[in-house]
Amino acid sequence: MGPQCPNYRHLSLTLALLKPDITKMPYSLQHVRQMIIEKGFVIVKSNIISKMSRCKAEAFYEEHSSRFFYNRLVTYMSSGSVHAHILALPCNSVDDSNAITTWRKLMGPTKVMKTRYSEPDTIRGTFGLSDTRNCSHGSDSLETAKREIEFFFPDFDPIGFSGSLEEKELLRKHRDNLLTINQCKFVHS
Ligand code: CMP
């Protein structure tokens, strides 16, 4: 096995949210899901929230509570369906932020109007409507990813997942091209 085919030992994880502007557009949602799969992500868990409570939206974005857009943001996030996904990418010990950086690159920058011109092939560049209604969210660090995954998946232990049989099985299937996707729940097995 040469450098072209590294022997990945772990899955790096991130939290991805698909926001109400994208989840209510079936064609756009399908397109975004296809972009996720084509990037090679393993979808470890999905939680389709038909309507996020305002209280939950406020708690999730608490760090932005003093910003001018906070009220607009939590009103929007609690206006419709939010899809939460734990996305994974194979990694070795030196690139355990792989899923975080790859998902953020696929989303594109927050400021949609600029992103439409600077990075039109990204999710936000293609589908974003405004700085608030910007399609998606992604964790920005390993620490944040752990906290945000636990926020939306309280039964999932990101630390325990590392080295678990579940991780090994997903890695093996990813390597051998044996992963199957449940299109309805949007989760790999
Ligand atoms: P997200 O990546 O989920 O992180 C914080 C969110 O706040 C961001 O995406 C946008 O939805 C929203 N946001 C950030 N900056 C602005 C802004 N200048 N005006 C309105 N909404 C914003």
Image (cartoon, rainbow, N blue to C red):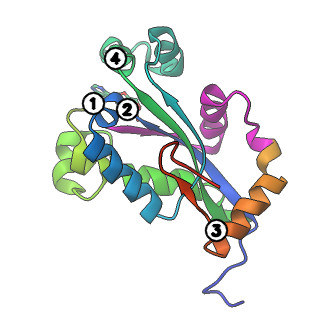
CA separation, marks 2 and 1? 8 Å
The first of marks 2 and 4 along the sequence is 2
Indicate which quadrant contains ligand 1.
Answer: top left
Q: State the image coordinates of residue 168 (x, y, percent, origin top left).
A: 78, 61
Residue drawn at (38%, 21%) of the image: 77
Q: Nearer the viewer, mark 3 or mark 1?
A: 3
CA separation, marks 3 and 1? 33 Å
Residue that mark 3 sits on: 174
Is disc 2 in contact with disc 1, using a CB cutoff of under 8 Å? yes
- Judge the density around disc 2: few (<14), some (14-19), many (≥20) Cα neighbours within 10 Å: many
Q: State the image coordinates of residue 151 (x, y, percent, origin top left).
A: 62, 26
Indicate yes or no: mark 1 CB to ligand 1 under 8 Å.
Answer: yes
The first of marks 4 and 1 along the sequence is 4
Q: State the image coordinates of residue 54 (x, y, percent, origin top left).
A: 44, 10
For the residue labelled by badge 3, is the local secondary structure a helix, a strand or a loop?
helix
CA separation, marks 2 and 4? 10 Å
Asked if one can make out residue 156 in the rendered structure from this viewpoint, the answer is yes
